[in-house]
Image: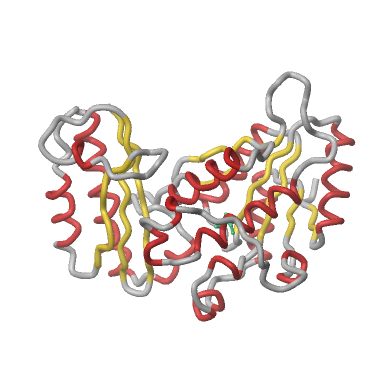
């Protein structure tokens, strides 16, 4: 069936309800995106299609989460290609609203605040970013809530929303928001998709030159090093991994640390001389040419 498009909330709800009804479906998946889609988004969409009767994807470049108008203006807009990619994964309906549909009164006065968890790591260099992202995610979760799909009677949640593990801090915050504010939704994290050389896919990678792309591979190499040390229960020796990244002249490291996967607080004692035990997340962020790149890997022993 060809993919359907809605640009208003009323139409999204009407089409979503009709789709669920026609399939006698009880589960709906929501895949929020800002467009400029790549294989990473395709993986989110595919997972949602596998797990739900009806899948809605949203494409909305949210002004509230951009620090400046230049960055917002240059964010790639590729609607036609995005619709094709989503259709190929089996997504049923795309919600692609104008800014006025999402923020009819202009910038909202009341927003979701991301608290301490939103101020560290990415939040430290992008003040207000996570408040803006959580505010729009809250709105999108409301818009996508299936009128006919909750609950399905078996005790299983019938409304699921999909986010990439690549944006680990965003995922942790969305999970926290859903728990703290009692959203009736299951948040599903989908593993990072990488190029064959290891670079985590991102809409911003298209701004890298060939040399910068090659240089950026040091990020995933350093993460893989920690991953293998953790799996072997060796000391992580984070300093040597940091030195490896810093030796690449085109890469300007911002942070590289090992944190608790839920609170994202640093786990200093696990990083240096003691054999690694347990679960953690290695987080990295660096500027490479014009682009800020982030990546992470789960560590487990
Ligand atoms: O990860 C993104 O693409 C965005 O932050 C999101 C979740 C769609 C909110 O605008």
For residue 242, side relative to residue 4 (left or right): left
Which corner quadrant of the image does residue 83 belong to?
A: bottom right
Q: Quadrant of ligand 1?
A: bottom right
Report the front residue among 39 and 182: 182
Tell me residue 243's x, y (percent). Answer: 13, 56
- Quadrant of the drawing holding the C terminus: top left
Q: Quadrant of the N terminus?
A: top right
Q: What is the x, y in percent for residue 131?
A: 54, 59
Horizontal and vertical percent position of residue 119: 41, 58
Rendering quarter of residue 43: top right
Picture residue at 58% right of the left edge, 55% below the top = 134
In the image, 52 versus 262, the foreground residue is: 262
Quadrant of the rendered image containing residue 251: bottom left
Q: Who's the residue at 79% across and 30% down the image? A: 26
Instruction: Give me the residue at 70% from left, 34% from top.
Output: 52
Residue 226 in the image: above or below residue 116: above
């Amino acid at each position: 069936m060809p993919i359907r498009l809605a640009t208003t909330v009323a139409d999204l709800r009407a089409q979503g309800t009709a789709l669920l009804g026609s399939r006698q479906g009880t589960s709906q998946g929501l895949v929020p995106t800002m467009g400029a889609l790549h294989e990473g988004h395709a993986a989110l969409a595919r997972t949602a299609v596998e797990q739900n009767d009806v899948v809605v994807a949203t494409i909305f470049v949210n002004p509230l989460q951009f620090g400046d108008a230049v960055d917002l203006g240059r964010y790639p807009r590729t609607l036609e290609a995005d619709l094709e990619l989503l259709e190929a994964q089996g997504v049923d309906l795309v919600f692609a609203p104008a800014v006025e549909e999402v923020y009819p009164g202009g910038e909202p006065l009341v927003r979701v605040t991301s608290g301490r968890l939103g101020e560290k790591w990415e939040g430290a260099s992008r003040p207000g970013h996570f408040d803006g992202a959580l505010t729009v995610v809250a709105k999108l979760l409301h818009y996508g809530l299936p009128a006919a799909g909750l609950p399905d009677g078996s005790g299983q949640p019938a409304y699921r929303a999909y986010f990439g593990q690549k944006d680990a801090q965003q995922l942790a915050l969305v999970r926290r928001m859903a728990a703290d504010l009692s959203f009736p939704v299951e948040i599903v994290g989908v593993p990072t998709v990488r190029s064959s050389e290891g670079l985590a896919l991102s809409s911003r990678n298209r701004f890298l030159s060939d040399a910068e792309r090659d240089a950026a591979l040091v990020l995933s190499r350093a993460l893989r090093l920690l991953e293998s040390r953790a799996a072997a229960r060796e000391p992580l020796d984070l300093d040597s991994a940091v030195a490896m990244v810093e030796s690449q002249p085109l890469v300007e490291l911002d942070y590289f640390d090992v944190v608790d996967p839920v609170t994202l607080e640093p786990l200093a004692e696990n990083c240096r001389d003691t054999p690694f035990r347990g679960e953690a997340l290695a987080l990295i962020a660096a500027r490479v040419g014009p682009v800020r790149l982030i990546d992470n890997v789960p560590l487990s022993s």
